[in-house]
Amino acid sequence: MGLPQGIEVPEALVASYTRNGGAEERAWIARLPVLVAALLDRWGLERDGGIASGEASLVVPVRRADGTRAALRLQMPREETTAAVIGLRAWNGDGSVRLLDHDPESSAMLLERLDPSRTLACVEDDDLAMGILGAIMGRLHSVPAPEGLRGLGDVARGMLAAVPSAATALTDPADRRRLRDWASAVAELAGEPGDRMLHWDLHYGNVLAAGREPWLAIDPEPLIGDPGFDLWPALDTGWEKLRASGDAPRVVRRRFDLLTEALGLDRPRAAGWTLARLLQNTLWDIEDGRTAIGVSQTVVAEALPRP
């Protein structure tokens, strides 16, 4: 799909919106050329390199009028894009990419430019990489949560309400028992959901090399809750490589130990909230038609310390 000034929307992004979305999604992707052109003009931006895209967003490298390198990020307005703006404003670059400007109508964000070619996965020493990630996570959690974000209590209650019907979709009785066990762990914690601002998706791929600091977090989906609920993406990061190593449980346990120590977390509580993430992931999988709990979910659960 052609855009003004020679920008091309990657076919994968077009397919994601047209194949998996409805009329609203198709209309948004069709309006994208005009939206990009309007934002470039409004913010006085010039393109500065090839574009990139994720599953749901378009990123255009740009330069501002003063020569500053930045990135124009566009994604269809959703609850999570609004939450991202709230979180980025509150963090104000402390451990995260800095928000330079925002268009409320389109949810477009102008962000400081990081190096997308260098993620934290480039650090070969896993202990070192996990230490970097844990330090960033601690900084993000230390910022008081602003108003306007969803709370983990509501998320937990929604998950628990979905378990009875979801469990019937699992074909293996052991999986059904596992799902109910995870739900029981969540039920014990749901009354004290926490009050920290979480990233919700902090893994190696969402930590990029930067100029003003060595590493910064990107793509947050902020939520107010217990820091233990933020651990799973880091525990599971690079899963295919972990699985190929043949020693995934050991690595997951080591990562859990490093993160809980760095963040000063109560280990049983952190393990319980990690089970909540596994429950959430499995409920999403069931919604997508899966009838078994994923291998990675089971491995992480079995690697966690027992109460």
Image (cartoon, rainbow, N blue to C red):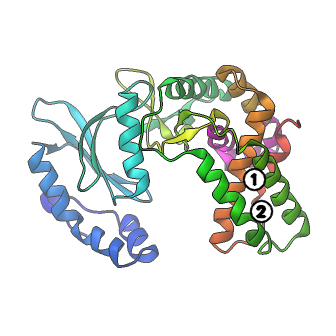
Which residue is identified by label 2? 293
Report the residue at 90% width, 63% height from top: 174
Q: Check the image and report above or below for 181 versus 214.
A: below
- The stretch in magenta equals 229-252
* Residue 143 image position (x, y, % from top left): 47, 25
* Residue 253 image position (x, y, % from top left): 79, 34
- State yes or no: residue 56 in magenta: no
> How packed is label 1: few (under 14 Cα within 10 Å), some, or many (20 or more)?
some
Which residue is identified by label 1? 297
| Quadrant occupied by the C terminus | top right
In-image side of 225 versus 293 (left or right): left
Along the line of sight, which residue is nearer the eye, 247 or 142?
142
Q: Check the image and report above or below for 288 versus 66.
A: below
Q: Does the image show residue 115? A: no
Report the residue at 9% width, 34% height from top: 65
Along the line of sight, which residue is nearer the eye, 193 or 220?
193
Dot 1 and dot 2 residues touching (CB under 8 Å): yes
Amino acid at the residue labelled 1: Gln
Q: Distance between the residues labelled 1 and 2?
A: 7 Å
Report the residue at 62% width, 47% height from top: 153
* Residue 240 image position (x, y, % from top left): 68, 50
* Residue 228 image position (x, y, % from top left): 67, 35
Q: Does the image show residue 179? A: yes
Label 1 sits on a secondary structure element that is: helix
